[in-house]
Image (cartoon, rainbow, N blue to C red):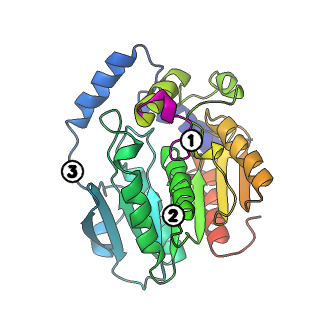
Amino acid sequence: MPSVRHQLLATVIPRVRRSRELEDEQVERARVEAWHRTLAPGLPTRAVPRFARRWDVTTEDLGFPAYVLTPRTRPVTRTLYYIHGGAFMAPIDPLHVRYATRLADAIGARVVMPDYPLAPEHTWADCHDALVADAGRWAEQDGGVVLAGDSAGGGLALAIAISMRERGLTPATHLVMHAPWVDLTTSTPETREVDAIDPWLFFGKLQAYAAWWAGSPDDLGRPEVSPALADLSGLPPGIVLYGTRDLLHPGCRLLVRRAAEAGWDLTAVEEPALIHVYGILPFAPEARRAFGQVVAFVEGRSVG
């Protein structure tokens, strides 16, 4: 049974985020584009305690910014390449920075956070090749690279891992996915049923944002867009964490089934009645448990 704190988050987060179903695609597109014009550049760090004291930040140009966070007070043994979620239309959130820096501290990593271009102004094709090449470059550094992400970013991390395999690049050592969006075709009929119990995500918006990111109906099923439908053999060890009160969980289950068929070493953590990306949300015991599971996975210990 979900904790009281998790139940509180399940109520508060949708209200704070003003979550509601799509009414009109064109109106939503105009709203998001107008919002994008107000966004300030740079990395949002206000949720990270003592960030300026503990981290040096440099910015690399991939055709879009990629922030490299190097710890000031400890050695670096690997790289955490963290790809933020937000349905491909929302920018890096302070929550992403907080989680990525905590995880990096726990596994002895620097952090690389690409600020990839957003839909609807952009599609997958505007950043995929650059992200694959950049992740491949970091994979060649000492300790290798852990590819990680949440929601849309989790799906994008998987898509990058697949492209790295296809291009013969050095693979990631591990792949970490929190409630990844891995099937933008919404081929799982159960998704419509979950729409009735998910307090945060909505089916109409899911379809609209998927169409924006794909750019064309013909691209919805591409490995770069819907990686759960791709060949999943030969990928680095992965872990996927998701709750069943999440509109994306049928797609996560599809991923788990297809991974087993392909012989991919994928650890699945399914939590009954938990909401979207529960594992990166602050304050709840379920998130603390998920954090420990991810650290154990990266360090080669039993997830439990």
**Mark 1 or mark 3: whose residue is earlier in sequence:** 3
Q: Is residue 88 toward the left or the right of residue 145 in the image?
A: left
Q: Quadrant of the C terminus?
A: bottom right
The three-letter amino acid code for the residue at tag 2 is: Arg
Q: Residue at x 69, y 36 (%)?
A: 250
Q: Quadrant of the N terminus?
A: top right
Q: Residue at x 75, y 70 (%)?
A: 302
Of tags 2 and 3, the one toward the viewer is: 2
Q: Position of residue 264 (x, y in %)?
A: 73, 60
Name the residue carrying label 1.
226
Residue 48 visible somewhere in the drawing: no
Residue 52 in magenta stretch: no
How far apart marks 1 and 3 lie (CA) works out to: 29 Å
Q: Nearer the viewer, residue 121 or 241?
A: 121
Q: Residue at x 43, y 51 (%)?
A: 84
**Mark 1 or mark 2: whose residue is earlier in sequence:** 2
Magenta span of residues: 215-226
Mark on residue 41? Answer: 3
Task: Sort mark 3 into few (<14), some (14-19) or many (20+) by Cα contacts within 10 Å.
Answer: few
Number of numbered labels in the structure image: 3
Mark on residue 167? Answer: 2
Q: Is residue 124 above or below residue 107?
A: above
Of tags 1 and 2, the one toward the viewer is: 2
Tell me the chief SS of the magenta region.
loop
Q: Residue at x 54, y 39 (%)?
A: 9
How far apart marks 1 and 2 lie (CA) works out to: 18 Å
Residue 218 in magenta stretch: yes
